[in-house]
Amino acid sequence: MKLDTVQRSSGVAALAFAVGVMAGPALAADKLQYFTWSGYELPEFHQSFLAAHPDGVDVTVFGDDDDAFTKVKAGFRPDIAHPCYDKIARWNKEGLLQPIDTAKIKNWDSIFPVFRNLPDLQAGDGKVWMVPWDWGNTSVLYRTDMVENPEKSWSLLWDKRYAGRLATIDAVHDTPVVAALLAGVNPFDMTDAEMDKVAEKLREQRPLLSSYTTDMTSVEQSLSSGELVAAMTWNASAVALKKQGVPVEFMKPKEGMLTWACGYVLLKDAENVDLAYDFINSRLEVESGKYLIEAYGYGSSTKSAFDAVPKETLEELQLPSDPNVMLKETVFTGPMKQNDALSKMFEKVKAGG
């Protein structure tokens, strides 16, 4: 779900411009139209596609995949989009997708079975609704020199001692999920009474926060300066700040990190289907996955990419070469039965209700 953080200091804006990031919905019919998280437009992820189609992709970015869903449902029509697994059933229910033929995905068999066989991906007869590409974690990133000996718990983001110096992610599949975990509630299937408990937990947190945000660039800058002492982030923020020498730790909360998986979907009205398959195949090549792992600390969906990364690099990134190892210790963000109701409640809480 999550490469917004790549904007931090790598000149992504220039790179994005170079591959044609678009500000609006005016789409060029002769180019692949790619709708994704900010940062996933980097050419390093699809070198062979660009070699074959030098001017073949235009990119439009979204803030999160709820935002993406809303725009596509309202009529925006890219060829290919990059939501996360927990949203696939929702996209499908609205009739926004067409099946992807796995026989046309060259590296399909290298995708870890745990992702390849996710229930909501299956479209029958060798077809899927999404090709998994990336996975990673959401957790608490904190300054080790400012938060001494913290309890390894998500409750750090509710700690009144750090009021005004905490931040959390502005997305229904992140902060409300954590609030549910702390409230002892199943985040993915809750009763009305349980949702009230989650709302109360979120209200408890609200006055302590500096911000709700998906702008990881700002979060990283604030952690670096000490304006923030702790924030909910994704793996890549930890990688970025450690590279800068900032004393931070990506927590392993006792309640469990969140683990997410995202990938590529083919829109029902896609005009450039052949280009879409070329693009997906390019993204599943070893070098693409290797770059994702080494540069940002996220997991590739393919075993072949992990095989290309030195063991010591994976250890430094705290990234197991088998996602099953991670999933045994974390909370996998699957579909939420009360997604719409939870989203409305979260918006109300953020507004002070």
Image (tube, grey):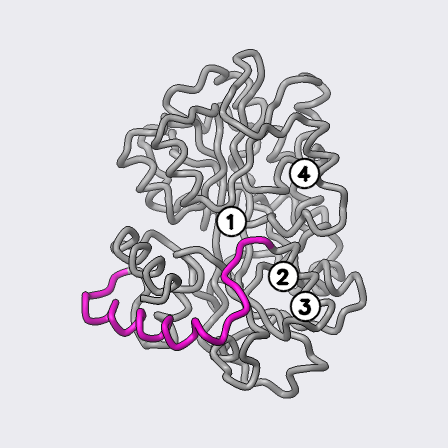
Q: Which of marks 4 and 3 is in front?
A: 3
Which residue is the site of mark 4?
Answer: 288
Distance between the Cα atoms at labels 4 and 2?
26 Å
Is residue 191 located in the magenta-colored stretch of the structure?
yes
Residue at the image position 33 percent from the left and 55 percent from the top:
343
Above or below — where is 82 with respect to 196? above
Which element type, helix, strand or loop, lies under badge 1? loop
Which numbered circle lies on residue 1? 1
Which numbered circle lies on residue 219? 2
Which numbered circle lies on residue 223? 3
Distance between the Cα atoms at labels 4 and 3?
29 Å
Which element type, helix, strand or loop, lies under badge 4? helix
Distance between the Cα atoms at labels 3 and 1?
21 Å
Dot placed on the residue nearer the N-terminal end, 4 or 3: 3
Amino acid at pointer 4: Ser
Residue at the image position 69 percent from the left and 79 percent from the top:
144
Which numbered circle lies on residue 323? none
Range covered by the magenta-colored residues: 189-215
Q: Residues within 10 Å of mark 1 (few under 14, many from 20)?
A: many
Question: Residue reaching furthest front?
Answer: 352
Q: Is residue 135 visible?
A: yes
Q: How crowded is mark 3: few (under 14 residues within 10 Å), some or many (20 or more)?
A: many
Above or below — where is 219 with respect to 150? above
